[in-house]
Image (spheres, rainbow, N blue to C red):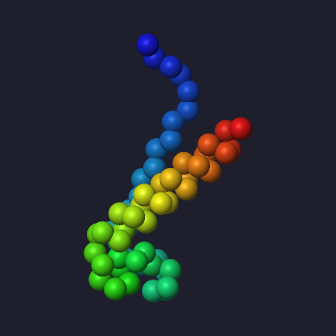
Amino acid sequence: MMVRGRSLMVSTNDYGEPSANAKHNPPGRRRGGGRRGNEHLDSYLLISMFNEWQRNLK
């Protein structure tokens, strides 16, 4: 069974150069925390974007 509906696709590129000053960079970039800090931030941003998308559907 196939259901037609909406889908959400998100693409992030957090491996490039910082786009703002150090205070706005993800925690992993500020103090050498590495990928571990970015994983948490990626998850938080993805969940926030998904929640906003769902609110806009109503």
How many dots with numbers? 0
Residue 27 is situated, as x and y percent measured from the top left of the image, at: 40, 77
Residue 7 is situated, as x and y percent measured from the top left of the image, at: 51, 36
Looking at the image, residue 52 sits to the left or right of residue 36; the answer is right
Q: Residue furthest top?
A: 1
Q: Residue at x 49, y 60 (%)?
A: 45
Q: Residue at x 55, y 53 (%)?
A: 49
Looking at the image, residue 7 sits to the left or right of residue 41; the answer is right
The N terminus: image quadrant? top left
The C terminus: image quadrant? top right
| Residue 14 in the image: above or below residue 21 | above
Looking at the image, residue 49 sits to the left or right of residue 38; the answer is right
Q: Residue at x 38, y 84 (%)?
A: 30
| Residue 5 in the image: above or below residue 34 | above
Looking at the image, residue 48 sits to the left or right of residue 36; the answer is right
Residue 43 is situated, as x and y percent measured from the top left of the image, at: 43, 58
Residue 39 is situated, as x and y percent measured from the top left of the image, at: 35, 63
Q: Residue at x 36, y 79 (%)?
A: 29
